[in-house]
Every structure is written in C-alpha cells, then in structure tokens.
Amino acid sequence: MRNNIFIIILLIFSFNLNAKENSGLDIKIFKNLRCIVCQGQSIAESNSDFAQTIKIVVRDKIKQGNNEQEIYNFLAEKYGEWIVYKPKFSYLNSILWIFPYFILIFGGTLVYKYFKKKNY
Amino acid sequence: MVRCFFNSKWWLAKVIFEKMKISLSKIILLTSIIFIVVTFFLALNKDTKYNTKDLVGKEIGEFEIKFLLKDEIFTKNNLIGNEYYLINIWASWCFPCKIEHPLLMRLSNLNNIKLIGINYKDKKLNANNFLKKLGNPYDILLEDKSGTNSVIFSVFGVPESILINDKKMIIKKFIGPINEADYQFIKGKINEK
C-alpha cells in the first residue's frame, strides 16, 4: 500500500517533468530571437507586445510539429534574418564563422614558433 | 619567370623592412588594429532597423482569419476579383489609426481597390464604436485578438498597411499611419492598369 502511494506520487511528479521538457525548446528559441521593437533584448527577456505575440506564434508552431530551424526560417522570412541572433552560414557570413578558427590556427602557430625558438 | 618576379619582389620588401627596422610582428599588429577599427566602423554604422525591402514582390502567406462581426473565416483563397487590396492593421486604442482614418475613407471611395481591415488586439465593443464614430472604410473586416495572425503579414505594431496586387504579391508595406503621399502612391498604382 505504501509502495503504491509512493509510485503514484512519483508518477505525478514525472508528468511535471514531462511538461518541463517540452517547455525547454520554446525558451531556447525565444533566447535566440531578437525583439525588433526593443533591439537590446531577446524575445525571452522582453515583455513588449511584439514579444508576447511572437511567443504565442512560436508555441503554436511547436505544437504544430515544426522544428527549430523551420520556425527560424518562417520568422526570418517575415522579419528578415536580423531577428535571429545566431547568424546563418552563408557566403556573406562565412568570414564570420571561419575567422575565429583561422585566428586560432594562426596564433597557435605563432606561439609554437616562439617557444621553439626560445627552446623551452 | 613568374617565380623569379615574385622572389625579387619579396626580396625587395624584405630589404625595405629591414632598413626601416619594421618587424613582422609590428606589421601584423598594425594590420589587425586596422582590421578591427574598419570592422567596427562598418558594423556600427550599418542600419539594423527593420525594413520591408525584402518583402516587396513576395506573395503573401496563407492565412485563416475570423471576421469581426460574423463567425466565418476569411482565407487567402477568398482574395479574388478585385485588382488591388490594401490590408490595414488597426486598433481602436491606437492613436495614429485615427490620424490615417480619413485617408482610408478616401481610399474606400476609389474603384479598383478593396480594403481589408484587421482589428488587432482589440475589444469588439471599442472597435465597433470606433467605426460608428468615424465611419467604416473596410470592405472586409477581420479580427485578430491574439495578434498571431498578423505575424503572417510581418506586422510588429499598429497601424500598418500592405498593398497587394491581383497576384497576391506585396507591392509596398507602409509602417505607421499612411499619409497624403502614400495615398497618392496607392492611387497611382491602382490607376496604372
């Protein structure tokens, strides 16, 4: 009897856990969306009218079974690529993505050469 | 020959640098500083405000919106017949909507255009009073209580107006209240045909 109650309580809490897992994706998406009427903030942080609307739209889209990328594409089509914080990998943006790795390799080589010269 | 040319040039540069006592690290430092300054200069001067340039020429998305006064649904497929449509997003609580209202009334008197009004995040009673007081310019009056349907039209505030042609393509999007110049623009467009 005691065990049964224990299991029931566990089940109830596991339902909550399930709900929490679902809400993870929308918050992740909100954080990656720029509020275009209040540019310093993300949709997740903002309470503006626009942000509220976008939150509802994103949740609806998740319910309809759209994945993260589809939602970004939809909003980028409507409001421009600017609305998504993380830039897309494209011809124009390629330098932005590749440059840090380039610097890393370049700097690494410099440091390596420097230490080799000094014979540490 | 080509190789020789490059070699000689490289050699010349080396000599110049050695004579001027410029080391390679200084050049790299200077180049990176210039790079950073130029990047910041360009990036910070870039206009990042939302603009509607990308929307022009695109077809409007699929939508299903409820009528304000009856329990029927208006969809994209219902957009047939007339040459041009002006989708106007408005609300009774929005002051600039009152400013543009006389121009909408004048537009509703023109022949080749139909006005679609989308009532945005509003109460039905207030919306009705607004139209009773100032007149109803809309041929089709729709309701968007949550504001989610307006996202299909890239709306981020009221008032906004979108001019579309018979192929359901966006000709122009007006952010904020339409003015006399916008009125003349719309009039010119619909009289082109």
Image (cartoon, coloured by chain):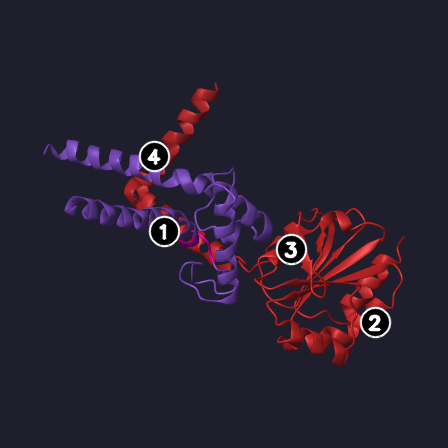
Residue A83 in sight here = yes
Q: Amino acid at mark 3?
A: Phe
Residue stretch rendered in magenta on the structure? A30-34
Percent across and percent down for residue A9 are: 23, 50
Residue B23 in sight here = no
Q: Amino acid at mark 2?
A: Arg
Pointer 4 or 3: first along the chain: 4
Q: Determine which of the numbered discs, if any, sits on residue A117 in the image.
A: none
Q: Determine which of the numbered discs, if any, sits on residue B153 in the image.
A: 3
Of circles 4 and 3, which is in front? 3
Q: Determine which of the numbered discs, if any, sits on residue B14 in the image.
A: 4
Q: Tag 4, which chain?
A: B
Residue B89, placed above or below residue B100: above
Q: Are marks 2 and 4 in contact (CB under 8 Å)?
A: no
Colour of chain A, in one word, is: purple
Of circles 2 and 4, which is in front? 2
The residue tagged 1 is B33
Which residue does the image show at 69% across and 65% down from the upper left? B68
In the image, B46: left or right of B181?
Answer: left
Q: Main secondary structure of the magenta part?
A: loop
Percent across and percent down for residue B157 are: 59, 66
Pointer 3 or 1: first along the chain: 1
Image-quadrant location for residue B74:
bottom right
Q: Amino acid at mark 1?
A: Ile
As measured in the structure, the alpha-carbon distance from the residue carrying label 2 to the one carrying label 4 is 75 Å
Pointer 3 or 2: first along the chain: 2
As measured in the structure, the alpha-carbon distance from the residue carrying label 4 to the one carrying label 3 is 61 Å
